[in-house]
């Protein structure tokens, strides 16, 4: 971690007892408590082995500054975010490292609207932390710790209000669920059973060492889920990440589909019922999301990559739906944050109402092929490379919201972004054929290599 920074793109993350220690979490907690100023804060954690230890450290630091801690225990991130709003808390803290491997943990700070705090607010907390501006409470004004054990059930009931439960129940879907041995196990099986689904689970015992699979729901981690879906003849497979805010789906044939395809299914149904609405999505999303918006009278609002930016933008432009290619769907009528269980309920509702299998819903969409690439680039040259590249492509249809994205007339596109964490440029190409996507990666890799040689 840099000397004046705590927060990365998604809160504070680090290796347990190396980059993130109990001592540090106590001080971070005091900085967060100083920032909130003696308010009521919800606290919860995911299934990681270090969760209870860091939750105790967080409780100590927050109560030392006079904040009251409402301890919710183990819960999915979206359940805790919902509880912050539902219980009129002033904010919340979630101990989670989301999709990172088990040796990591992290801290997400939630504002009273249930959305993670803005990057400006993160800077305020860092300022308090690094400049010794901690304000501790007098002995007779310390905060109290109270317990709140109802958040998971309240969350399940809230999701059910946003879907046609009768239509879903009637279909008696068979769903295979893989919550990665983490907190999705606490809510999704109950939700699905309440929706009259037959539920088969794998990796559903809570185990912070994540013995079943790594918590990032990438296709290579979901082979077991795909096999079980096919072998049991289930209608659908669902995999969550470690804190259950992202959902990736497997169709009845055992094929894993990346998040922008399932998001486009939800987007289409949403726009049919709510035409002329805005859809918020990062520039890393597929052109498919734009195609659906064009076909069903929606308006795309592109953002930088990052879930907090999507949530904040939804609030700014008053949008009710957002989505990411990594399986994050933000359903505003419920809450403007990513929510794995809400996404699952929406997909089941669409399958129930249309009578179509997931593979059919996917096959109906415009098809795109994807290629990815990366090029090494020293940190100090990243800015120059982007500047030179922009000079070369300025006459094309481009967006510079995050790196540079270029859309071509044949519906192919390429996104070229400097990585925020590594000395590399990442390239994501999409086209109507695999060959064309591959060609784009080669062409733009060469351009960047040539630019690098001139610097
Ligand atoms: Mg997550």
Image (cartoon, rainbow, N blue to C red):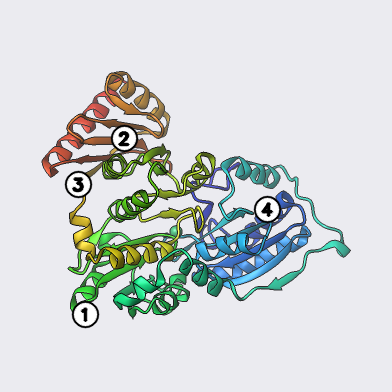
x then y, percent, for residue 438: 16, 40
Q: Which quarter of the image is occupied by the C terminus?
A: top left
Q: Earlier in the sequence, mark 3 or mark 4?
A: 4
CA separation in Å, label 3 and label 2: 23 Å
**Which class describes the residues within 10 Å of circle 2: few (<14), some (14-19), or many (20+)?**
many
CA separation in Å, label 1 and label 3: 29 Å
Point out the frontmost of discs 3 and 2. 3
x then y, percent, for residue 62: 71, 60
CA separation in Å, label 3 and label 4: 46 Å
Q: Provide the secondary structure element on which disc 3 rests.
A: loop
Q: Earlier in the sequence, mark 2 or mark 4?
A: 4
* Residue at image mark 4: 32
CA separation in Å, label 2 and label 1: 41 Å
Are dots 3 and 4 in contact, CB under 8 Å?
Answer: no
**Which class describes the residues within 10 Å of circle 1: few (<14), some (14-19), or many (20+)?**
few
* Residue at image mark 3: 366
* Residue at image mark 1: 232
């Amino acid at each position: 971690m840099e000397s004046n920074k705590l927060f990365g793109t998604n809160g504070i993350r680090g290796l347990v007892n190396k980059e993130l220690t109990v001592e540090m979490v106590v001080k971070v907690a005091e900085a967060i408590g100083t920032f909130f100023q003696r308010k009521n804060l919800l606290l919860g954690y995911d299934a990681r082995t270090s969760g209870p230890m860091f939750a105790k450290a967080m409780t100590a630091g927050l109560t030392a500054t006079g904040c009251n801690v409402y301890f919710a225990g183990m819960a999915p991130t979206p359940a805790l975010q919902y509880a912050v709003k539902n219980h009129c808390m002033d904010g919340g803290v979630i101990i989670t490292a989301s999709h990172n491997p088990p040796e990591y943990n992290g801290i997400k700070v939630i504002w009273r609207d249930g959305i993670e705090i803005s990057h400006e607010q993160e800077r305020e907390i860092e300022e308090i932390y690094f400049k010794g501006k901690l304000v501790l409470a007098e002995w007779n004004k310390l905060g109290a710790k109270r317990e709140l054990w109802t958040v998971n059930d309240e969350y399940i009931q809230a999701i059910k209000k946003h879907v046609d439960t009768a239509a879903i129940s009637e279909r008696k879907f068979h769903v295979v669920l893989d919550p990665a041995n983490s907190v999705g196990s606490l809510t999704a099986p109950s939700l699905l059973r309440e929706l009259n689904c037959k539920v088969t689970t794998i990796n559903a015992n809570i185990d912070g060492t994540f013995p079943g699979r790594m918590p990032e729901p990438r296709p290579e981690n979901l082979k077991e889920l795909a096999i079980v879906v096919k072998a049991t003849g289930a209608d659908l497979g669902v995999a969550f990440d470690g804190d259950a805010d992202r959902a990736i789906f497997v169709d009845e044939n055992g094929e894993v589909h990346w998040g922008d395809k399932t998001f486009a299914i939800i987007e289409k149904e949403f726009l049919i019922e709510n035409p002329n609405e805005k859809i918020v999505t990062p520039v890393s999303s597929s052109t498919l999301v734009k195609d659906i918006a064009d076909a069903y009278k929606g308006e795309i609002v592109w953002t930088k990559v990052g879930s907090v930016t999507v949530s904040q933008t939804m609030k700014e432009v008053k949008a009710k739906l957002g989505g990411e290619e990594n399986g994050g769907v933000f359903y505003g009528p419920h809450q403007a944050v990513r929510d794995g269980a809400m996404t699952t309920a929406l997909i089941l509702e669409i399958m129930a109402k249309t009578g179509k299998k997931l593979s059919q819903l996917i096959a109906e969409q415009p098809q795109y092929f994807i290629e990815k690439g990366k090029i090494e680039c020293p940190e100090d040259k990243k800015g120059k490379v982007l500047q030179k590249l922009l000079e070369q492509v300025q006459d094309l249809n481009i967006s510079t919201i995050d790196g540079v994205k270029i859309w071509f007339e044949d519906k192919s596109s390429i996104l070229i972004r400097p990585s925020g964490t590594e000395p590399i440029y990442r390239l994501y190409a999409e086209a109507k054929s695999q060959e064309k996507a591959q060609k784009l990666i080669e062409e733009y890799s060469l351009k960047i290599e040539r630019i690098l040689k001139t610097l």
